[in-house]
Image: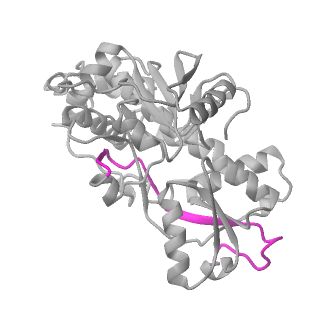
Amino acid sequence: MLKRFALLFAVLALVAAACGGGTTTATTQAQGSTTTAATGGGNAGQETGKSTLDVVKERGELKCGVSGSAVGFSETQPDGSVTGFDADYCRAIAAAVLGDASKVEFRALTAAERFEALKNNEIDVLVRNTTWTQSRDSDIGMDFAPTTYYDGQQMMGDPARLPGLTPDSGFEAIDGATVCTNAGTTTEKNITEGAKVAGVKITLETVENFPEAMDKFKAGTCDILTTDGSGLYGNRAAQIKAGTPGAENWVIFPSSPISKEPLGPVTRQNDSKWHDVVDWVVFTTFIAEEHNVTSANIDQTKDDTPELTRLFGGEGEIQSKMGLAPDAFYQVIKQVGNYAEIFERNLTGPLGLKREGSLNRLWTQGGLLYAPPAR
């Protein structure tokens, strides 16, 4: 949820840029990190002949594209700091590359802006609940790191307006409904294609940012809200907490999502040195959980196995060959935590999202989280 005060100047800058076509950047500094609304060009990222890794190291700061309004994933707080699952993966990358998880400038981007911002070098990496698809991997020209959250699109409705709505309802329940979501997303395409296949008619209304869709849903302008299931559960939890009348009765359906939405970090194509680093930051959080290594016990457990010794900077380490400090991945776990810690801190604790029974478990527990050997 966008916070009214934290992004006031960023919003004004966005409006000014949209009206005047200029290149304006609004920045708020807080708690050792920066939140910026990117509104124009610039070459803040990769330079000709250099890997983004070298650029980030020389700059001393990571520019990370996030949503800024995705509940549980990246939320800009009133003081300008950014919290959430995606935000913590930005910090994990900074910890590995710069040795300091706070060295992040967060760029709040809409779904429509995110890929151009990455392609135009305004950011170094995109960690913005972005779905890995064939066209994005090829035609648009992105490279996707390992999936950090396996999601799926669902819908949410108010049974007070749509009687008979249950978690087992399907497309038949939205025939004739007005459906709201944000533009420039796979969500928009999935709901359109799904309705066509199911033979139902809907009126699709799109907005730039999901909080706008939520406002329309609460006002009754939209009958149905649709996005990734995690977003719906997160927003419903936030509305219940805020005391929104009837929010506890809102129904999320169907129980089996209507799409596959593998979400994770994104880099520019053909920058393998940088992409390898982002890959192994994610893999490190998986491997650490696999071995029960946490931010609290890493100093006691970092040499429990030869693989951990290598991964955390001891004998046989490979990080220096990647252009990183030997202890780069030690810093990831020490400063940010393993996958379970990141998930619990941002999704389970605040929102009640569970890993049990989901794909977001380690491969040893029946999930899809799997890392290659660190050797």
* Figure coloring: one colour
Question: In the figure, 352 relative to 93: above or below?
Answer: below
Question: As drawn, is 11 to the left or to the right of 36?
Answer: right
Measuring from the top left, give residue 148's x and y in whole percent: 41, 47
Is residue 113 visible in the rendered image? The answer is: yes
Q: Residue at x 83, y 70 (%)?
A: 160
Residue 199 vertical placement versus 305 (above, below): below
Asked if the magenta segment contains residue 33, the reply would be no
Residue located 39% across and 18% down the image? 61
At 31% from the left and 60% from the top, the residue drawn is: 134
Q: Residue furthest right?
A: 245
Hey, which quadrant is residue 17 in on the image? Answer: top right
> Is residue 149 one of those drawn in magenta?
yes
Q: Is residue 308 above or below residue 234?
A: above
Residue toward you, 117 or 244: 117
User: Does residue 126 appear in this view?
Assistant: no
- In the shown orientation, is residue 342 left or right of residue 75? left
Q: Position of residue 15 (x, y in %)?
A: 63, 33
Q: Which residues are magenta?
A: 140-168
**In this image, 313 relative to 238: left or right?**
left
By secondary structure, the bulk of the magenta-drawn segment is best described as loop
Instruction: Quarter of the image for the N terminus: give it.
Output: top right
Where in the figure is residue 347, as x and y percent of width and height?
57, 45
Residue 206 at x, y = what percent? 61, 58
